[in-house]
Image (spheres, helix red, strand yellow):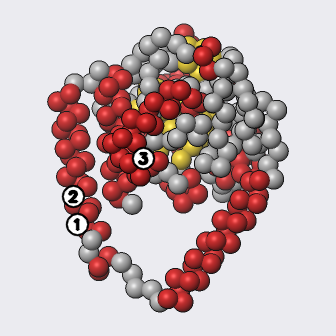
Amino acid sequence: MARRRVLVAVAAVCVLATSCGVAAVGVTSVVRSFQSQTEQVSSTDASPEALPETTAEERTGRAGEERTENAEEEARQERLPVAQSCDSLEVLVDPRHALPPDYSPTDLVYIVGYGVPTVGGDMLLREEATGKLAELMQRAGADGEELLVASAYRSYSEQQQTFAHFQGIYGPEVEYVSAPPGQSQHQLGTTVDFTNSEVGYQLLPAFSETNASRWLERNAWRYGFINTYPAEDISGTGRQAEAWEYRYVGKETAREIHESDLGLREYLAQNGLAPCRSGTSDATAEAPGQQRAW
């Protein structure tokens, strides 16, 4: 598990370095640091003392409980109504509910035009989400917090290229560092990745320890944004926690999620919509200079 956290961080560093023109020497030092952590984690994980002893009966019982929980979850998600349009803010996107390859929002706008600071140039986001994002950024700045957007909308084809790149590097570990095409929240055009100078303008686990991240935890929902991969739902999402990624779902839905004990995926699995069957061609949404990230 710890090794997977290292892979996530290394992947984020590598992609942002390519996209943003970060000096290679800086990236190399960070990657070497994570490689060192990986070696330490591997030696720790290999110790028999780190594994609790369990009986065959306990293992069988746990496996049975997990199968029952998975079956109930699958049955519940299969009952989700299919969205008439993937433009719905409450579409569930996960391994069981992928967006169609031809879907892209038709109301994408450049976020820099709304005063949103970015890393690596202008980016696209749906118009409603962009307006609320601009309000969030202004409030954060007024509260003394530095936030920049490192990634926003990504088309299916862009995610396909990104996923293939990491698959060649990480093999079977790839889904812990990159979403398969159709399963990225970024294709919705309502999801952004935040960063700041405290983490070198990268997407790193250390972002969760910054004041800016804690500010987002307390306030992002007020503007309609919810963390997509919270630490509390790692077992459900199948992804490592990503404190930097937030999705716009609308202020009312965000309030309901914030006031519940549910994460975004859990809430949408109960109250959301399955993705539409097809959408508009993503060719209309490609933009020159758009940043590609994981």
Residue 43's disc number? 1
Q: How dense is the environment of label 3, judged by Cα within 10 Å: few (below 14), some, or many (20 and up)?
A: many
User: Quadrant where the C terminus lies?
Assistant: top left
Mark earlier in primary sequence (2, 3): 2
Q: How dense is the environment of label 1, judged by Cα within 10 Å: few (below 14), some, or many (20 and up)?
A: few
Query: Could you say whether the residue bearing mark 3 is in a helix, strand or loop?
Result: helix
> Disc 3 marks which residue?
174
Camera-near label (2 vs 3) is 3
* Residue 276 in sight from this viewpoint: yes
Q: Residue at x 30, y 68 (%)?
A: 45
**Residue 280, above or below 12:** above
Residue 39's disc number? 2
Q: Could you say which quadrant of the image residue 67 lies in?
A: bottom right
Q: CA distance from mark 2 to mark 3?
A: 19 Å
Picture coordinates of residue 193, whole percent (x, y): 48, 33
Side (left or right) of 97 relative to 232: right
Kind of residue at badge 3: Val
User: Quadrant where the N terminus lies?
Assistant: bottom left
Side (left or right) of 189 relative to 116: right
Picture coordinates of residue 74, whole percent (x, y): 71, 59
Tags 1 and 2 in contact by the CB under 8 Å rule?
Answer: yes
Picture coordinates of residue 274, whole percent (x, y): 75, 43
Q: Residue at x 75, y 35 (%)?
A: 277
Q: CA distance from mark 1 to mark 2?
A: 6 Å
Side (left or right) of 85 relative to 193: right
Query: Could you say whether the residue bearing mark 1 is in a helix, strand or loop?
Result: helix
Kind of residue at badge 1: Ser
Q: Could you say which quadrant of the image residue 139 lies in?
A: top right
Which residue is more in the foreground, 195 or 168?
A: 168
Which residue is more in the foreground, 114 or 43?
A: 43
* Residue 210 in sight from this viewpoint: no
Kind of residue at badge 2: Glu
